Image (spheres, rainbow, N blue to C red):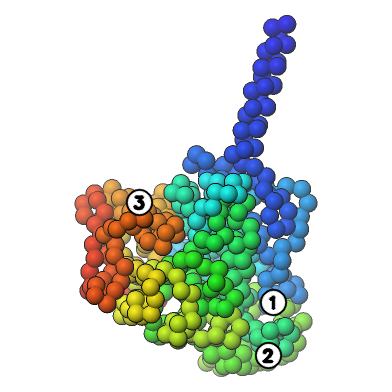
């Protein structure tokens, strides 16, 4: 009898634990089928890794707009990241190769359209938590959503913001335009596939995030470097700007000439056609049969022979992009939402004027606030300063992946920054629901927030004259 009672007790406890686990990590139904996540070390936070948001863009789908997800059977366990987009492996001896320590073990594949989600409210459809979608940088030619310095999903989710990180097509597979591709397209244009991937991800979030406890009407897009240029493109695009509630552009400039998203569509098409014609690749079938290695070798041989470079990056195609971000902002055609723009003290270039010009324009044209910042903390461990991308360790509080001797002051600054960024995602105000040190930019107070440390504390104050200290690199990331 005692054995029977003991057996029943064990069964009861096991059943209770099973039900509790199912409640904390429920099976969700999303576009494509059912999915279950994995627990993280942070209590209550569930991660979903490698969730497909489009059909793999391979074979005949290379150089086409992202297509709807192919349905799967059963329950997909989202426990590992999808592949990174095709790219050249970082040189482990380069500055960033040493900094991120991420090359070598990362799979690269054309099948790369996956996103990752961290949520503290899985299955709670009525929770309506704010959502932040991260777009990685890398010059539109490299990088991926799960780089170690971007490992901040738990930090963000613990503050009540669902973090979504997105992989998108890069380089020749993400931004190749050609007259034959334009003729094939229902919209009569080609290229910008990487931006279309990002737009598809925003739409996927809007359609599915309720399952994860998110609010489809409170989506923040944020990114750094090429990711910042992407944020600007999405906020200007007629295909996506109405789905975005807040935007953060980090080290992507502001108004005026900058390297992202202002290239001539017609010129780029002609240059790419000349490139393919040079190798007698005159049909789409021949082009789609080329491997990534073939295309890299061809681009090098073409450049060596003709002294011309083929360009693979965003273009103004009058479909995804109707004009440069600067022109669209001046015309009042970008999303009318709160913005945050900033850069670092040793960035690729001095962005003080373009950032302040953008802030001044928004302060003049909109009642929605705009916030500017300047990351001034020189990173410990060497003399590279607050270099381009240095702030990523702080945005995601991901110091555990770095070799640098971060101090108590760095940890305090990072926690303050994560609070600012997540508050902005929640309220469109980095201070939260009230006033704080960080004031919105205005004509009466044209100031940026300085982000730095003082001993073992964060030191944040407003200034109208940040001091740019020059880039330690000829070209960064």
Is 38 or 34 nearer to us in this picture?
Answer: 34
Residue linked to disc 2? 179
Q: Quadrant of the N terminus?
A: top right
Please state which of residues 287 and 20 is positioned toward the viewer in this rendering: 20
Going from the N terminus, do you reach mark 3 or mark 2 first?
A: 2
Q: Are marks 1 and 2 in contact (CB under 8 Å)?
A: no
Q: Position of residue 446 (x, y in %)?
A: 26, 74
Residue 78 position within the rendered picture, expressed as x and y whole percent measured from the top left: 64, 50
Marks 1 and 3, the one that precedes in the sequence: 1
Q: CA distance from mark 3 to mark 2?
A: 49 Å
Label 3, secondary structure: give it: helix
Q: Is residue 359 rendered to the left or right of residue 237? A: left
The residue labelled by disc 3 is 415
The answer to whether residue 303 of the structure is visible from this angle is no
Q: Which residue is mark 1?
A: 64
Q: Is residue 410 left or right of residue 329?
A: left
Find numbered disc 2 in the image and state the secondary structure of the residue it sits on: helix
Q: Position of residue 345 (x, y in %)?
A: 29, 69
Q: Secondary structure at mark 1?
A: loop
Q: Is residue 98 above or below residue 313?
A: above
Residue at 51% over, 78% down:
236
With 178 as the anchor, is 350 left or right in this view? left
- Between the residue at mark 1 and the residue at mark 3, the CA separation in whole angstroms equals 41 Å
Question: Badge 2: few (under 14), some or many (20 or more) residues near its Cα, within 10 Å?
Answer: some
**Residue at left 52%, top 68%?**
244
Q: Quadrant of residue 255?
A: bottom left
């Amino acid at each position: 009898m005692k054995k029977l009672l003991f057996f029943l007790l064990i069964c009861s406890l096991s059943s209770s634990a099973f039900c509790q686990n199912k409640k904390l990590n429920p099976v969700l139904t999303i576009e494509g089928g059912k999915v279950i996540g994995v627990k993280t070390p942070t209590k209550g936070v569930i991660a979903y890794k490698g969730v497909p948001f489009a059909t793999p863009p391979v074979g005949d789908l290379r150089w086409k707009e992202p297509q709807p997800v192919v349905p799967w059977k059963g329950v997909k366990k989202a426990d590992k990241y999808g592949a990174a987009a095709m790219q050249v492996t970082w040189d482990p001896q380069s500055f960033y190769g040493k900094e991120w320590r991420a090359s070598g073990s990362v799979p690269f594949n054309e099948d790369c359209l996956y996103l990752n989600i961290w949520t503290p409210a899985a299955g709670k459809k009525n929770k309506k938590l704010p959502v932040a979608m991260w777009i990685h940088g890398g010059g539109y030619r490299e990088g991926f959503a799960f780089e170690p310095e971007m490992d901040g999903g738990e930090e963000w989710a613990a503050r009540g913001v669902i973090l979504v990180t997105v992989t998108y097509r890069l380089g020749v597979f993400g931004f190749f335009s050609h007259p034959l591709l334009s003729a094939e397209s229902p919209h009569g244009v080609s290229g910008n596939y990487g931006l279309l991937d990002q737009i598809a991800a925003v739409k996927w979030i809007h359609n599915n995030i309720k399952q994860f406890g998110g609010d489809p009407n409170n989506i923040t897009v944020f990114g750094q470097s090429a990711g910042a240029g992407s944020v600007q493109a999405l906020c200007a695009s007629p295909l996506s700007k109405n789905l975005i509630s807040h935007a953060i552009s980090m080290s992507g400039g502001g108004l005026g000439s900058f390297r992202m998203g202002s290239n001539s569509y017609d010129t780029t098409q002609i240059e790419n056609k000349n490139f393919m014609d040079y190798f007698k690749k005159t049909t789409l079938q021949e082009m789609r049969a080329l491997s990534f290695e073939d295309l890299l070798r061809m681009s090098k041989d073409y450049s060596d022979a003709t002294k011309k470079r083929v360009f693979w990056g965003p273009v103004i195609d009058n479909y995804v992009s109707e004009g440069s971000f600067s022109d669209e902002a001046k015309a009042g055609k970008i999303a009318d939402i709160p913005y945050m723009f900033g850069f670092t003290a040793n960035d690729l270039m001095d962005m003080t004027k373009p950032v302040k010009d953008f802030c001044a324009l928004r302060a003049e044209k909109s009642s929605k606030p705009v916030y500017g910042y300047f990351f001034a903390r020189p990173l410990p461990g060497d003399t590279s300063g607050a270099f381009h991308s240095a702030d990523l360790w702080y945005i995601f509080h991901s110091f555990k992946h770095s070799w640098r001797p971060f101090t108590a002051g760095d940890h305090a600054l990072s926690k303050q920054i994560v609070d600012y960024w997540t508050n902005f995602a929640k309220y469109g105000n980095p201070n939260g629901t009230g006033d704080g040190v960080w004031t919105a930019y205005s004509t009466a107070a044209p100031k940026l927030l300085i982000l730095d440390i003082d001993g073992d504390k964060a030191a944040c104050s407003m200034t109208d004259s940040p001091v740019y200290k020059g880039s330690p690199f000829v070209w960064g990331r």
